[in-house]
């Protein structure tokens, strides 16, 4: 019998509502400034309306940020670390980075921090922040990146010399829960340099400002009564703060060594920002002004406020470490640190036990370390996401009404949307807002460690306060009406299967509930994105930002629309996933066989439409090239194939499903109706892989790709001079490096060229590139598709991998090879990790080399990490690949 670990017991207790172990967690953002929620400008320029320079002085409206911060579930009370090295011009309360317009490749965090460990209930959390001894080079980073263009590398913090001769502090941040609302906090600061250096360690405790917006009664989760933090008696070398909140209750923060206490209000410094008098002399940036500018009158002499800090000053010799301990608890504790060491070590051991029970023991220690850091990043990337669109558009009573252009501007068609949930973010600095298709991928590794949380994430997006009344799922806060790929049904099915509790009634109810909501979403797709009703779809950019000749989410400069190979393929994929879910539900309720049949028929129509067998007769399949392409559909009815060899032509691979013989035989109604279609509508069924022919294990196959077309596409995909890189499938074929695609129309030339690294244009802010690099989510979907094809074809189908090598592999072996290429991005090979490219400090320094970053995408030639550096959300899929990688060869 498998032993249930302490962490698993906590998860069970939380599920059964015996304890609220998720009451506290890493729910602060890494960046709340320059978000859409905080943008009250007339023109929607979020980056410039609320810049980093305002963040220390302006109270946030919708959520808080901090370094390695935590909060309660409602984010009433917040805690985070601030630092000052005696040199910085700004108290280091939050992470700095370039805004979208400032970066030569878009927005980018310019800090070094690593999420090292976390458990699902946050009973133990650990992260590392690296803080220079010298003044942080804010101006240098902004000015040099502004000077550089699209063809230049980004100018990084290491490039400034701030870490030369190891002149920096390692700041290790640890939290351990003694109880549901009892947090042990430990900061360990180590001087890595060869000279002594000063460091101020300034833990902050504050309340989210819910009282300054002019309401008599708090809307939603706002509390209009002002809370208070005050000093209470200090004894036995312990400084104590008492925090009273009308809704959140009372907490005490205990700090060892009698540090200095500072108090102010979490209120905007309007005098500094807007030249108008402050409502209170004690404002948000008081600690900055006190410590850096020696303004003693900035802090409150009354020893109370809505924001407080403890100040520790330390001079550390070379190599010296110093530890600072605090405890935040809802109980009065006469001796808060007596059991500190015991509990901390116990939680660390329990975290080890939990992951030992989860991880594949046949994997190498290095792989298990990478996987555990992937899980840590997923869990650290949780954030309380608060956004009431109607309230945001209308403005708050305490402030002038918004300009009319704002009321009718961004997201005005989403006034129903009210979000106040802990959600998995793509990257809490770069993307501190949920994105629906990102979230679907997050749930695949998350279900391995916290099935309840993964299911809750998928359910949230389909709730009526998220999903639009017309059935659309929200995309992301910059434009909720943008269209993300329809992968939610796939994610729900995979979470259901990976969790492996199919006999559990609650799990069946999860699947049933999400299926019913996705029926609405599927109908929205059919009604809104199939313009002529011929089962060829125009989804939009579908997350693949600049993969095309045009910006596919906007109005085309040449008019018309794009009939999309990827959008149509994904709808075929959607049909098959919905069919599979319906058949699963039909095991206990036969009525779902009708819906399974409906999706089977719709899949046939989509598969036929893609190849021109029905409808317009125009095919997205190019028989001569053996590839699928988008088509520019002009207003005069003519179509121009957009012959860009990109992943849009590979995505038909995804629309594949196999059925076990038992399933097919048990569903009499479904079996009878599918055979009717096959016999009576050969125009629909004759152009796809046939369900009538049993394959390996008597399985049945449904796929857009016939065997012949599958082989042709794989020949291109597995060609190292096309899509196959050492580290996965490229987003655009390398063929376009020497042969750029050009479209000449209306005296203009539009070009797509293979770009192994960053974008060379400003489409989507210039910070995303689908023109060559390897993207994890698409690779993962391709791997699963190959596995499903192998379920049917078995060893009867083998192709060359790589193309031209003479090495024949079945499709499962190819899926394994692609998995190993992706995993290898993170592995040391001859002392070098591909993800770190030429950054030698990351490659060789013992204090850097074993810490893993999970990037947004990866260089198409050498695998170096690109884009957002903490996008564990979908790069964290490597955790699932590692789990199934088994014994290393």
Image: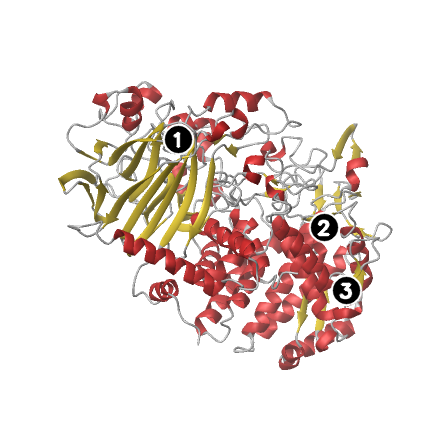
Q: Is residue 327 above or below residue 658?
A: above
Counting labels gives 3
Q: Is residue 159 above or below residue 579?
A: above
Label 1: how many residues lie within 10 Å, few (<14), some (14-19) or many (20+)? some
Mark 3 and mark 2: span between their CA atoms?
16 Å
Tell me what residue is drawn at x 58 percent, y 70 percent.
Answer: 582
Q: In this view, does 257 lie to the left or right of 611?
A: left
The residue wearing badge 2 is 565
Q: Is residue 321 above or below residue 354?
A: above
- Which dot marks residue 402? 1
Q: Residue 397's quadrant in the figure? A: top left
Label 3: how many residues lie within 10 Å, few (<14), some (14-19) or many (20+)? many
Label 1 or label 2, whichever lies nearer to me, is: 2
The residue wearing badge 3 is 688
Mark 3 and mark 1: span between their CA atoms?
54 Å
Q: Which of 433 and 726 lies nearest the eye of the viewer?
A: 726
**Residue 507, x across and y down, in percent:** 47, 69
Label 2: how many residues lie within 10 Å, few (<14), some (14-19) or many (20+)? many
Tag 1 near tag 2, CB within 8 Å = no
- Which dot marks residue 841? none
Q: What element carries label 3?
A: loop
Which is more N-terminal, label 2 or label 1?
Answer: 1
Tag 3 near tag 2, CB within 8 Å = no
Residue pushed farthest right?
A: 624
**Residue 792, x across and y down, in percent:** 72, 70
Which is more N-terminal, label 2 or label 3?
Answer: 2
Confirm whether residue 427 shows in the render: yes
């Amino acid at each position: 019998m498998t032993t249930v670990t302490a962490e698993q017991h906590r998860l069970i207790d939380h599920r059964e509502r015996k304890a609220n172990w998720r009451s506290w967690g890493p729910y602060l953002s890494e960046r709340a400034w320059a978000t859409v929620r905080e943008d009250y400008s007339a023109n929607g320029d979020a980056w410039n309306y609320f810049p980093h320079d305002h963040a220390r002085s302006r109270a946030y409206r919708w959520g808080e940020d901090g370094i390695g911060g935590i909060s309660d579930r409602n984010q009433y009370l917040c805690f985070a670390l601030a630092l000052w090295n005696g040199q910085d011009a700004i108290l280091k309360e939050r992470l700095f980075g370039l805004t979208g317009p400032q970066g030569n490749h878009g927005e980018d965090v310019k800090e070094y921090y690593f999420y090292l460990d976390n458990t699902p209930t946050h009973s133990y959390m650990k992260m590392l922040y690296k803080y220079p001894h010298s003044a942080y080079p804010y101006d240098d980073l902004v000015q040099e990146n502004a000077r550089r263009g699209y063809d230049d590398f980004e100018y990084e913090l290491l490039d400034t010399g701030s870490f030369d001769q190891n002149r920096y502090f390692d700041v290790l941040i640890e939290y351990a829960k003694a109880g549901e609302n009892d947090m042990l906090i430990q900061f360990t600061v180590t001087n890595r340099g060869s000279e002594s250096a000063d460091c101020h360690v300034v833990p902050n405790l504050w309340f989210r400002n819910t009282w300054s917006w002019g309401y008599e009664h708090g809307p939603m989760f706002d509390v209009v009564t002002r809370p208070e933090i005050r000093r209470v008696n200090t004894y036995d070398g312990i400084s104590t703060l008492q925090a009273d909140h009308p809704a959140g209750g009372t907490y005490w923060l205990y700090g060892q060594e009698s540090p200095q206490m500072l108090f102010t209000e979490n209120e905007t410094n309007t005098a500094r920002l807007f030249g108008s008098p402050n409502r209170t002399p004690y404002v948000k940036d008081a600690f900055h002004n006190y410590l850096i500018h020696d303004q003693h009158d900035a802090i409150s002499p009354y020893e109370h406020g809505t924001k407080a800090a403890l100040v520790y000053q330390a001079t550390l010799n070379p190599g010296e470490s110093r530890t600072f301990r605090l405890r935040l608890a809802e109980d009065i504790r006469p001796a808060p640190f007596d059991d500190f060491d015991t509990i901390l070590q116990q939680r660390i051991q329990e975290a080890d036990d939990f992951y030992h029970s989860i991880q594949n023991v046949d994997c190498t220690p290095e792989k298990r370390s990478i996987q555990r850091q992937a899980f840590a990043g997923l869990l650290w990337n949780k954030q309380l996401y608060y956004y009431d669109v109607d309230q945001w558009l209308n403005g708050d009573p305490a402030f002038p009404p918004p300009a009319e252009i704002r009321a009718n501007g961004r997201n005005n068609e989403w006034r129903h949307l009210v979000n106040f949930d802990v959600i998995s973010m793509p990257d809490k600095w770069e993307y501190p807002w949920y994105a629906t298709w990102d979230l679907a991928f997050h749930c695949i590794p998350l279900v391995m460690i916290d099935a309840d949380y993964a299911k809750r994430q998928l359910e949230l997006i389909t709730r009526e306060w998220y999903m639009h009344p017309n059935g659309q799922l929200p995309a992301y806060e910059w434009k909720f009406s943008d269209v993300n790929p329809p992968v939610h049904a796939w994610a729900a099915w995979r979470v259901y299967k990976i969790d492996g509790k199919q006999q559990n009634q609650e799990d069946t109810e999860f699947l049933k509930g999400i299926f019913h909501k996705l029926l609405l979403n599927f109908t929205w797709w059919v009604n809104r994105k199939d313009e002529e009703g011929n089962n060829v779809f125009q989804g939009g950019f579908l997350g693949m930002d600049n993969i095309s000749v045009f910006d596919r989410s906007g109005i085309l400069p040449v008019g018309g629309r794009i009939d999309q190979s990827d959008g149509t393929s994904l709808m075929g994929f959607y049909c098959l996933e919905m069919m599979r879910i319906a058949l699963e539900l039909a095991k206990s309720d036969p009525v779902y066989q009708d819906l399974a049949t409906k999706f089977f028929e719709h899949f046939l129509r989509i598969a036929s439409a893609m190849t021109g067998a029905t409808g317009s007769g125009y095919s997205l399949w190019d028989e001569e090239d053996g590839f699928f392409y988008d088509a520019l559909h002009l207003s005069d009815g003519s179509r121009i194939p957009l012959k860009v060899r990109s992943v849009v032509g590979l995505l038909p691979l995804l629309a594949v499903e196999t059925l076990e013989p038992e399933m097919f035989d048990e569903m009499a109604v479904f079996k009878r109706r599918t055979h009717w279609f096959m016999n009576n509508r050969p125009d629909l069924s004759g152009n796809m892989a046939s369900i009538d022919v049993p394959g390996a294990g008597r399985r049945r196959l449904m796929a857009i790709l016939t065997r012949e077309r599958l082989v042709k596409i794989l020949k291109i995909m597995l060609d190292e001079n096309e899509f196959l890189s050492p580290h996965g499938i490229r987003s655009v074929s390398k063929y376009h490096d020497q042969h750029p695609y050009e479209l000449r129309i209306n005296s203009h030339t539009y070009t797509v060229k293979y770009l192994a690294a960053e974008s060379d244009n400003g489409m989507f802010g210039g910070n995303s590139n689908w023109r060559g690099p390897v993207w994890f989510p698409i690779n993962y979907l391709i791997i699963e598709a190959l596995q499903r094809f192998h379920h049917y074809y078995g060893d009867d189908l083998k192709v060359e991998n790589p193309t031209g090598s003479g090495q024949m592999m079945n499709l499962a072996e190819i899926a394994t090879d692609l998995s190993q290429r992706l995993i290898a991005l993170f592995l040391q090979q001859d002392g070098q990790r591909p993800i770190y490219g030429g950054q030698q400090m990351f490659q060789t320094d013992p204090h850097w080399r074993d810490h893993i970053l999970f990037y947004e995408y990866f260089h198409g030639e050498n695998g170096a990490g690109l884009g957002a550096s903490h996008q564990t959300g979908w790069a964290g899929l490597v955790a699932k690949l590692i789990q199934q990688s088994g014994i290393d060869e």
